Image (cartoon, rainbow, N blue to C red):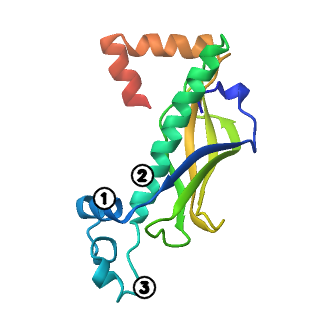
Amino acid sequence: MTRWFEDITLDEAFPLGSHTFEAEEIIRFASLYDPQYFHTDPELAKQSHFGGLIASGWHTVSIGHRKMVDTLFAEEERLRGEGKEPGVSGPSPGVNSMDFKAPVRPGDTVSYTLVVTGKRVSNSIPGWGLLFNHLEAVNQHGELVYRAELVGFSKLRDYRMPLKLKVLLALTRVPVLGKLIRRGS
């Protein structure tokens, strides 16, 4: 999220937008990144248990991730337009689960939604919090095609580093002391 950790509301849905998957795009993506016949060859794909060409799951994920990043940038611009300072989003320490629930076929329009379902202050990185997110994608029939549980960092707006931590950080920058401190931890 491009909001400060303190400003993030749990269970608020963020629509990320939709994408229509076309056969040519499915084949092009799969040819580069997931060249299995049911993603690249419409004739052979008819003989698969999918009964036809389907998008790679990674294609579905990549489009959703792009939609998420575009939405973060748009949220940043929206906040700036209101005269507010946007928060700082950080990297993701991982994906807790990822499920491909139904195949995405040529002509399917998939809509993505992100929901922050939990948050806590980071135990290991001062000044940052962790966001626990659900990302879901449904096709034009309302059928769930993809779901993931993602974790991401968000900066705390009001964080003040404790003096003890400031001193320890400063000591690690002194060459000899820094080596001793790093060895001891």
Q: Which label was assigned to residue 62?
A: 2
Report the side of 69 relative to 87 (left or right). Answer: left
Vertical order, 77 against 103 (above or below): above
Tag 2 near tag 3, CB within 8 Å: no
Secondary element at image label 2: helix
Tell me which amino acid carries mark 3.
Gly
Q: Considering depth in this image, is 13 or 123 the residue closer to the camera? A: 13
Q: Which residue is mark 3?
A: 51
In space, the residues marked 3 and 1 are separated at their CA atoms by 20 Å
Figure quadrant of residue 16: top right
Tag 3 near tag 1, CB within 8 Å: no
Figure quadrant of residue 153: top right
Vertical order, 101 against 47 (above or below): above
Secondary element at image label 1: helix
Figure quadrant of residue 128: top right
Looking at the rendered image, the disc whose residue lies closer to the viewer, 2 or 1, is 1
Report the side of 15 relative to 39 (left or right). Answer: right
Residue 43 coordinates in the image, percent (x, y): 29, 82
Residue at 30%, 58% (x, y): give it: 29
Secondary element at image label 3: loop
Q: Which residue is mark 1?
A: 29
Vertical order, 109 against 143 (above or below): above
In space, the residues marked 2 and 3 are separated at their CA atoms by 24 Å
Tag 2 near tag 1, CB within 8 Å: yes
Residue 165 coordinates in the image, percent (x, y): 56, 17
Specify few, some or many for label 3: CA neighbours under 10 Å numbering under 14, 14-19, or 20 or more.
few
The image quadrant where one finds the C terminus is: top left
The image quadrant where one finds the N terminus is: top right
Tell me which amino acid carries mark 1.
Phe
Specify few, some or many for label 1: CA neighbours under 10 Å numbering under 14, 14-19, or 20 or more.
some
